[in-house]
Image (tube, rainbow, N blue to C red):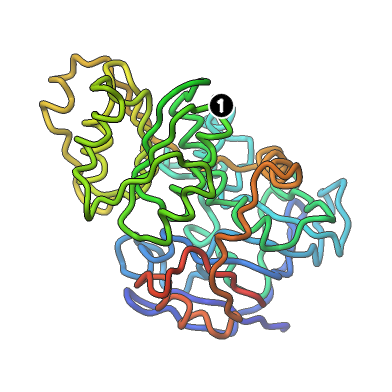
Amino acid sequence: MAMMKAAVFVEPGRIEIEDKPIPDVGPNEALIRITTTTICGTDVHILKGEYPVAPGLTIGHEPVGVIEKLGRNVQGYQEGQRVIAGAICPSFSSYACQDGCSAQDGGSHSHGYKPMGGWRFGNTIDGAQAEYLLVPDAQANLSPVPENLSDEQVLMCPDIMSTGFAGAESANIRIGDIVAVFAQGPIGLCATAGARLRGASLIIAVDGVDERLTMAKQMGADITLDFRKDDVVAEIMKLTGGRGVDASIEALGLQQTFESALRVLKPGGTLSSLGVYSGNLTIPLDAFCAGLGDHKIITSLCPGGKERMRRLMDIIASGRLDLGAMVTHRFKLEQIKEAYELFSHQRDGVLKVAIET
């Protein structure tokens, strides 16, 4: 039996490189030889035991690679072709997907609705931090990589870029809007870039790490605020003449950032929440205007599917956005424990790491 190396969740606080069988390919599946992948903040939640997955599961959900083998029903692709697949890999057959919410489509669920059903890689099936990845519903999820784009240029598309852009899209940003983006980690940076592409006239980026605030300017922020030095809510209200922002995007998943994002909203504004919350979230009565402020609070999970991936890669190919600078560190798969240690502790100005197989 042919074997491969894979980063496996063992128990909270422990991920190990182990040998696992290379998967067999079913009729609707494709086997991808991974060339580059990365570590996501959600993977860190898994490592810490804050998000439960089964012991023995291969982690990771951001694949860039080459088609090794195609199932007999998968048409329009070739073995040896460079592809990506979204972190969310919908089947486009579930009630959720056919109702227009493909991110929640993980296929048919015999026991009812399952939140985050579309997130399968590294959650309910083996993921991308390995030498090979089995892609389910490959016809719907494989997206060819344009020849002129490198692995690192498209590495953000499967999750970070799609999620950050979803935050801007869900915020319903219009031309001329004022937008505040709370937290400038990789997803927040992509939300900032998405707000610029949506036509915001003033983008205010909030963080407490100098390197991230500098990167936020590259991604399209007009003003950066350091929460270590500024009363962010007061400063944003001052910048907007007391009106508040049209939209705020929360990209960290903490009570403090959620509450600040709510407090700076204008009446009728939209709070677009992207953070993964690991504890109870409270909505303060005054900031919520006792429910009478016409506010909208909306959450988003990373949109997937080959058309979403094509659109994202086309934005990069057009030259309107370059996310390659977000890759600050590079490791081999065999060094993934070192990569997790760096990324989880946010050392050395890390934004995203590239894991090469």
Image check: 357 left or right of 303? Answer: right
Q: Quadrant of residue 100?
A: top right
Q: Residues within 10 Å of mark 1 (few under 14, many from 20)?
A: few
**Does residue 37 appear to the left or right of 293 in the view shown?**
right
Quadrant for the C terminus, please: bottom right
Report whether residue 140 is seen: no
Amino acid identity at mark 1 = Gly
- Going 66% across and 66% down the picture, which residue do you hit? 133
Which residue is more in the foreground, 62 or 52? 62
The image quadrant of residue 235 is: top left
Residue occupying image coordinates x 35% and y 33%: 248
Q: Is residue 88 above or below residue 352?
A: above
> In this orientation, which residue lies closer to the viewer: 51 or 300?
300
Counting the numbered discs, the total is 1
Assign the N terminus to one quadrant of the image: bottom right
Q: Is residue 241 visible?
A: yes
> Is 271 in front, or is 318?
318
Q: Is residue 160 above or below residue 172?
A: below
Percent position of residue 111, x then y? 42, 42
Q: For the residue labelled by badge 1, is the local secondary structure a helix, a strand or a loop?
A: loop
Residue 82, given in percent of the width and then of the height, sits at: 80, 60
Q: Position of residue 283 (x, y in %)?
A: 17, 34
**Residue 342 in the figure: left or right of residue 240:** right
| Residue beneath disc 1 | 100
Instruction: Say which quarter of the image contains residue 53.
Output: bottom left
The image shows residue 128 at horizontal and vertical percentages of: 59, 66
